[in-house]
Image (spheres, grey):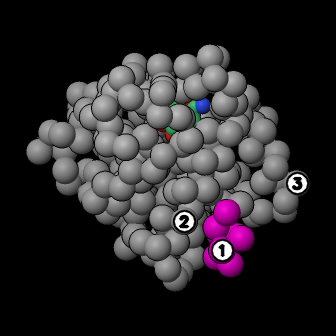
Amino acid sequence: MEIRPLSRDEVRQIDNVAIEQYGITGLMLMENAGSGAARLVNEIAPAGKVAILCGKGNNAGDGYVIARHMELLDREVKLISIVDTESLTGDAKANFQIADRSKLPIIAAADRVRLAQELTSADIIVDCLLGTGATGSLRGLFADAVAIANQTDAIRIAIDVPTGIDCDTGQIMGEAFCAHETITFVAHKLAMQIPECHQTFGRIHVVGIGASKTILQRFA
Ligand SMILES: NC(=O)C1=CN([C@@H]2O[C@H](COP(=O)(O)OP(=O)(O)OC[C@H]3O[C@@H](n4cnc5c(N)ncnc54)[C@H](O)[C@@H]3O)[C@@H](O)[C@H]2O)[C@@H](O)CC1
Ligand SMILES: [K+]
């Protein structure tokens, strides 16, 4: 089913309707998002070490799901959290805990030096720092992580939206993760229609999250 480009508010509406009116839980949506993204990452970059950069919100939650599915695809994968994982909440926390109990490598990178060490050894960097919940200029280590990732030779893959670009307006908030590929959920976001932004998004792929046709049809 073809969906038109969506605003931040519209994707939130879809998530909320699926969760509140249809009983498709946030965890189900995240599992579909993350497993679909993992399969695509594996297709886009079938060999090499994968580093998944994680922030604090549900975009990070996707990262923890992606890591679990990448491991099942026999990929060498590590998670790099730039926030204190104790501060995670909701579905992101749940998927962090699953990853942790599953003994996936989760590295706490609390400073620039550690971040640079961890990112320079990766062949593929997956950006799960910020998604549609990003507001304002990148703060603290978020800005450092984006800058360091952009300086590497790795294949850079953004999940949902590259960190640092506003998904509605395309405005760059300081520096944006310069993605070779973006795996976005449900449909393109408004900024993906803006020609000046194409360089930041790279090639765009759409992955469904399992919201049913009755939920999506008003956005067709
Ligand atoms: N149930 C759902 O709503 C689903 C959400 N999904 C994912 O969730 C994402 C949206 O999740 P959230 O709304 O939690 O948002 P984000 O994951 O974008 O995170 C927002 C959080 O990051 C921090 N933050 C915001 N702007 C910042 C800045 N400029 N610098 C540093 N920190 C900043 C704040 O703590 C904020 O609470 C989507 O992009 C998608 O990847 C998918 O898993 C599909 C299902
Ligand atoms: K992202």
Reply above or below: 1 against 104. above
**In which quadrant of the rendered view does residue 157 lie?**
bottom left
- Residue placed furthest toward the bottom: 47
Percent across and percent down for residue 191 are 24, 36
Reply above or below: 79 against 71. above
Mark 1 residue crowding within 10 angstroms, few (<14) / some (14–19) / many (20+): few
Residue 76 can be seen in this image: no
- Residue under the image location 52 percent in, 72 percent down: 42
Element under label 1?
loop
Element under label 3?
helix
Circle nearer the viewer, 3 or 2: 2
Residue 210 can be seen in this image: yes
Q: Which residue is mark 2?
A: 39
Q: Which residue is mark 1?
A: 73
Tag 1–tag 2 contact (CB < 8 Å)? yes
- Would you say 124 lies left or right of 191 here? right
Percent across and percent down for residue 175 are 31, 43
Element under label 2?
helix
The amino acid on which the numbered mark 1 sits, given as a three-letter code, is Leu
The amino acid on which the numbered mark 2 sits, given as a three-letter code, is Arg
Q: Which residue is mark 3?
A: 101
Q: Which residues are magenta?
A: 69-77
Quadrant housing the C terminus? top left
Q: Earlier in the sequence, mark 3 or mark 2?
A: 2
- Residue placed furthest toward the left: 195
Q: Earlier in the sequence, mark 1 or mark 2?
A: 2
